[in-house]
């Protein structure tokens, strides 16, 4: 199984701007547990913002499932 690099993750995040943890998992064929430490790296660098459906309800385009707090989104900042 190929390993995911921080650069690959960064490039994908930049191209999408806002992406869910589920979409990242599907795209990279990786579990959230694998992706989260890498995402935290970019959050610590101030390049990425993490949001949940509870914290961003009403701010996303499209439908928002306010009853489900398990949706996690990442937004590239730059």
Image (cartoon, grey):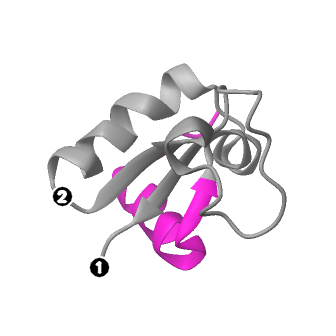
Up-down: is 45 above or below 31? below
Query: Which residue is at a point 30% across and 38% down the rendered structure image?
Result: 40
Q: Left or right: where does residue 19 sit relative to residue 48? A: right
Residue 51 location, x and y as percent? 47, 45
Highlighted magenta segment, given as a residue range: 1-19
Q: Left or right: where does residue 75 sit relative to residue 40? A: right
Return the residue at label 1. 78
Query: Which residue is at a point 54% across and 50% down the rendered structure image?
Result: 56
Q: Left or right: where does residue 64 sit relative to residue 41? A: right
- Residue density around tag 1, few if under 14, some if 14–19, many if 20 or more, within 10 Å: few
Residue 17 location, x and y as percent? 52, 72
Q: CA distance from mark 2 to mark 1?
A: 9 Å
Quarter placement of the N terminus: top right
Q: Nearer the viewer, residue 50 or 61?
A: 61
Return the residue at label 2. 46
Q: Quadrant of residue 39?
A: top left
């Amino acid at each position: 199984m190929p390993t995911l690099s921080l650069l690959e993750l960064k490039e994908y995040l930049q191209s999408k701007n806002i992406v869910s943890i589920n979409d990242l998992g599907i795209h990279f064929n990786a579990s959230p547990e694998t992706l989260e430490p890498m995402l935290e790296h970019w959050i610590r660098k101030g390049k990425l913002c993490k949001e949940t459906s509870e914290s961003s309800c009403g701010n996303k385009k499209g439908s928002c499932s306010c009853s489900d707090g398990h949706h996690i989104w990442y937004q590239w900042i730059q």
